[in-house]
């Protein structure tokens, strides 16, 4: 079982590798924050492939609209990200701000407009003065470095309390390749200052269609399994870039056996970033892993897990260090998924509290209380005798969440 | 527009009418609470019709299982309700507790077992010692009164802060009839101590099938339009009893023109109780009414309204007296319902903050801040040019909600 010390490790920024064909820079553009970086630029070598997915919200920001339009072309030369203002609900002015930014970068890099990706995170409805960004493009391009990871990871934060990065090395067809990524998002999916952004870079030689498939699958197992407050951002963006500099032949097919090691490493990168987002959940004091088994299918198990993870009553109970398994049972019931009520069992850590539809009579309250004082809480749920299982991650719901979100804008 | 003084009026218990064929009593049975009533019994005259609906949760309490089994017979002689322990997740012992209670009442009243309805609200997973209830049945039957409304309404409360009752008079075919009801539930639909229970009694002469239809329709417009924390109880129960003592011929058909006045009055009773539940939402300081229009259908408008009403970020913003319309836009987007982003408008009270997909540029921040200090906050949302509309009710999400729910069980 994961120990509290692991939580601390999650919060420190790791050393990330240099990746051939990729450089980064960041600066303060005074968009909203003073005295910290709030703008980053990533440059990719010509021929870089890209794929990704964006928020499913019906109301999307201007940058998301832009990326959705260009991503099918599958090529990238640059990524520009600002924090402070999300450029959402800003009408034609917002679209023009994106266009002018992309245009400036494409002129400077002498690349196509549809090779410039844009992401913004911050307040909704405020107009983004893109001259603050375009004025900095020249400086950013002159200061690109291969190892600027931590500065860049810092520049995309909003209410996050620590920068998030991770990496893995693996092999494709005997050739070493690197995968690295940075992310932000502390109310997973809070709209205001806590959009989820994640950017993955690899030197592997992959087609853009393959990246698209890899990201779709990987997202299901990682960002699709976390929740902080059940709210969905207008700006959520996950992009993966392959510079194609690694010395193996290009991979096109997700079923290609050469991809096995890489796909596992990529999942690890995505899951690691997803967990870091939850650990930094707004106001969170505890990281909660919910393991569901016995459901009629994996997708049913995931719905049950997310129903538990999204329940304010479960999350406040954990905040109060209360092994309130009754609320877990309630959340299983409200999921709407088929369960066998007489077979439901619930454990907190190694302590079983409900078994086959009834309370366990003898429990060691002292040891359970001790367990609940920890920062890493694991809930095991069994809902029947079928094979469906899932693991999802969330955090507790604390007074600090309310404080952050009640007092934020004013 | 509703004024703050109306909120105060909602919190006071009104004088409810005596209804022919119906009597009530309540007492302390020491189930969980000392020094207050926690058990009530309602007696209905022979020939009383009944209909109702119960929680859609997949995990239901023993009393809900019982009521679901007997309600199709359509006859009622008694209703027994306790607070403190919900008798949920208690296996066969829980079922036996219900059976013994119903059996005791049926012996005393000399009625059928399937005419005795049972409801329990309180902690999940605790065993209910039904002897505490059966020992009191004799006393309760000897102390029945027509006007015992407020005591009974108090006896069914858990974390609620005030008893909830309401009534309407109307006519059926020229005959005066009364409708009265009591309810509880303060985290609307929190599992532990805040199940939603509502009981409606009328002297109208109605078939049980008609009651069933009336309650199903009425619920959609009332309890179906409120949310406190998005959690769903294992015990939610709404029952309506008609003693059939009013001097008009029995009504069987929901389209019977004689029913028009009654149906409106019943909706009013249900909506009134639903609003009282929200006003008493756990930790709530403000009552929020969300009016959505322009959606593709009424049901789409309701989904959008509930998406806004369930968003922790919208609810914390209102708690912080912040007209954060950006979060409202986010919640519209995440509803998954079809909307025209370029047509979205949002107002708080009479203050329009977003219009046709963009922020309103000139707003009177001082007056808006003044408005948000009130206890009644109305949000108007337009999402397109279609005819679908809805009104839903919720409350703000405060530090006190966390305090109540983090510290409750331990």
Image (tube, coloured by chain):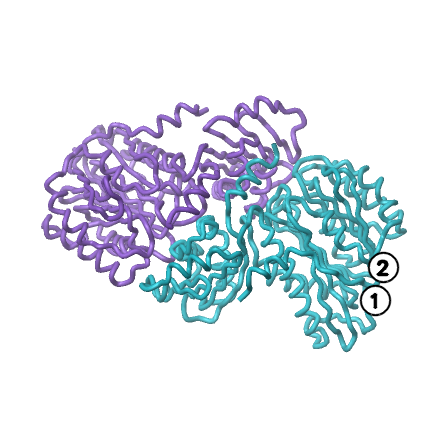
Chain colours: A cyan, B purple
The reply to whether the C-beta atoms of the residues labelled 2 and 1 are less than 8 Å apart is yes
Number of numbered tags placed on the structure image: 2
In this view of the protein, which residue sits in the foreground, A329 or B52?
A329
Image coordinates for residue B73, horizontal then vertical, percent: 22, 52
Please give the name of the residue rendered at 70% of the width and 70% of the height, measured from the top-left corner.
A262
Q: According to the image, label 1 marks what residue? A: A245
Relative to B154, is A251 on the left or the right? right
Note whether A86 is above or below A355 in the view shown.
above
Where is residue A47 shown, x and y percent of the image?
A: 84, 61
Q: Which of the labelled discs sits on residue B131, or is there none? A: none
* Visible residue check, residue B263: no
Q: Which mark is drawn over residue A45? A: 2
- Is B154 above or below relative to A262? above
The residues bearing labels 2 and 1 have C-alpha atoms spaced at a distance of 9 Å
Q: Could you tell whether B362 is left or right of A370 in the image?
A: right
Front residue of B392/A394: it is A394
B125 sits left or right of A128 in the view:
left
Classify mark 2: helix, strand or loop.
strand
């Amino acid at each position: 079982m994961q120990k509290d010390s692991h939580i601390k490790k999650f919060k420190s920024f790791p050393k990330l590798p240099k990746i051939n064909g990729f450089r980064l820079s960041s600066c303060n553009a005074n968009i909203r924050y003073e005295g910290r970086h709030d703008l980053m630029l990533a440059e990719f070598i010509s021929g870089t492939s890209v794929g990704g997915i964006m928020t499913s919200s019906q109301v999307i920001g201007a940058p998301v609209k832009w990326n959705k339009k260009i991503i099918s072309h599958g090529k990238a030369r640059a990524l520009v990200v600002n924090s402070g203002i999300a450029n959402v609900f800003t009408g034609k002015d917002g679209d023009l701000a994106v266009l002018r930014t992309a245009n400036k970068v494409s002129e400077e890099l002498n690349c196509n407009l549809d090779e410039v990706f844009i992401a913004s995170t911050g307040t909704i409805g405020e107009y983004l003065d893109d001259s603050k960004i375009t004025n900095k493009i020249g400086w950013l391009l002159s200061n690109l470095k291969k190892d600027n990871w931590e500065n860049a990871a810092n520049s995309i934060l909003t209410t996050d309390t620590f920068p998030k990065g991770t990496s893995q090395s693996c092999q494709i067809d005997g050739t070493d390749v690197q995968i690295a990524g940075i992310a932000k998002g502390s109310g997973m999916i809070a709209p205001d200052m806590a959009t989820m952004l994640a950017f993955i870079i690899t030197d592997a030689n992959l087609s853009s269609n393959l990246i698209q498939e890899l990201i779709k699958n990987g997202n299901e197992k990682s960002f699709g399994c976390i929740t902080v407050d059940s709210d969905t951002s207008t700006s959520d963006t996950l992009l993966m870039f392959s510079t194609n500099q690694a010395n193996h032949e290009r991979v096109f097919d997700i079923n290609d056996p050469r991809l096995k090691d890489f796909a596992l490493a990529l999942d690890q990168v995505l899951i690691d970033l997803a967990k870091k987002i939850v650990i930094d959940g707004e106001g969170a004091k505890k990281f909660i892993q919910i393991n569901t088994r016995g459901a009629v299918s994996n997708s049913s198990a995931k719905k049950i897990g997310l129903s538990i993870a999204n329940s304010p009553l479960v999350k406040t109970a954990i905040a109060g260090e209360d092994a309130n398994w009754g609320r877990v049972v309630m959340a299983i019931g409200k999921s709407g998924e088929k369960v066998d009520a007489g077979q439901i069992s619930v454990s907190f850590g190694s302590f079983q509290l409900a078994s086959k539809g009834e309370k366990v009579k003898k429990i060691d309250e002292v040891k359970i209380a001790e367990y609940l004082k920890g920062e890493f809480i694991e809930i095991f749920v069994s809902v029947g005798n079928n094979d469906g299982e899932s693991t999802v991650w969330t955090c507790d719901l604390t007074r600090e969440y309310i404080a952050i979100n009640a007092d934020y804008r004013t």
